[in-house]
Amino acid sequence: MQSMRTAKPWLFFVLFLTAICLTEFMTTPSMVFAQGESPDLVPWNMDRFRVTQRLGGPTLEYGNLTANIGAVDYKRPRNPDGTWSFTVIYQYTLSVEQDGEWVQIDQRDKPIICTIDMYTAAACIQEHGRVFTCDANQGISRGWADDYFPTLQGQWVFLGDYTGRFWLNGKLDPYQQLQADGLPPESVDANPDNNDIDVILTWDGSAVTVEETIRSYDNPC
């Protein structure tokens, strides 16, 4: 009986140290980071719609923000020869409503000029100021967004003589370049299933009116 009494304090001490170690282990930053090791690029917003004739016919032009809502900063990947391997950031598809059905009338790719930190998107997850610029160091930081404004190459679809109700879809990374084998974690898009944005709008020949914008992701803030 005496040996059992003397052993109990040591047992309690060991259990106490074990509990502390387990608590530290479960809350260490590396354990949290392991739940998501990659950025998550999403089409944050499409806006600034207008119809112009500057490209040789009636074209619908627009801006588009691309945000990173993932776990880490996104870094634009390169090929072994140093060239950029992520080259097409969006594919835009325009359909017109005819007799209750959507009929595709145009589809175009948006090539990448560069990816940079331009605007705050999700302030609650931002970790630092602007880092990425349009030079050798390209990417989008966590919580930041890049802006592709209406006058940039590829930020348009051909409208032609159609008027009425339209559906414009923007698909980020349409050729799955950010899912390629061998990419480092900071260049992989963590969730390719939230890469669509859809805008329902009308054009009556004089003005563009946005009816609805449908996003495929949840705002982290």
Image (cartoon, grey):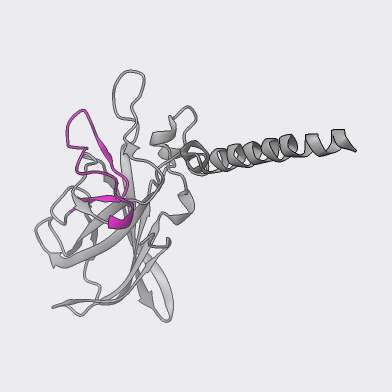
State the residue lying farthest toward the front. Answer: 2
Q: Position of residue 48 (x, y in %)?
A: 17, 65
Is 129 one of the magenta-colored residues?
Answer: yes
The residue located at (38%, 77%) in the rendering is 98
Q: Position of residue 35 (x, y in %)?
A: 52, 44
Q: Position of residue 215 (x, y in %)?
A: 39, 65
Is 46 one of the magenta-colored residues?
Answer: no
State the residue lying farthest toward the top. Answer: 81
Can residue 122 be seen? no
State the residue lying farthest toward the left. Answer: 54
Can residue 132 be seen? yes
Which secondary structure type mostly characterizes the magenta part of the structure? loop
Relative side of 153 to 187, left or right: left
Q: Total label count?
A: 0
Q: Position of residue 143 (x, y in %)?
A: 30, 51
Image quadrant of residue 113?
top left
Vertical comparison of 176 with 195: above or below: above
Image quarter (top left, top right, bottom left or bottom right) of the C terminus:
bottom left
Judge by depth and name the residue closer to the eye, 136 or 3: 3
Vertical comparison of 94 with 176: above or below: below
Judge by depth and name the residue closer to the eye, 131 or 214: 131
Relative side of 6 to 15, left or right: right
Relative side of 30 to 90, left or right: right
The residue located at (69%, 35%) in the rendering is 14
The segment highlighted magenta reads 123-148
Image quadrant of residue 7?
top right
The residue located at (90%, 38%) in the rendering is 1
Judge by depth and name the residue closer to the eye, 117 or 90: 117
Judge by depth and name the residue closer to the eye, 5 or 204: 5
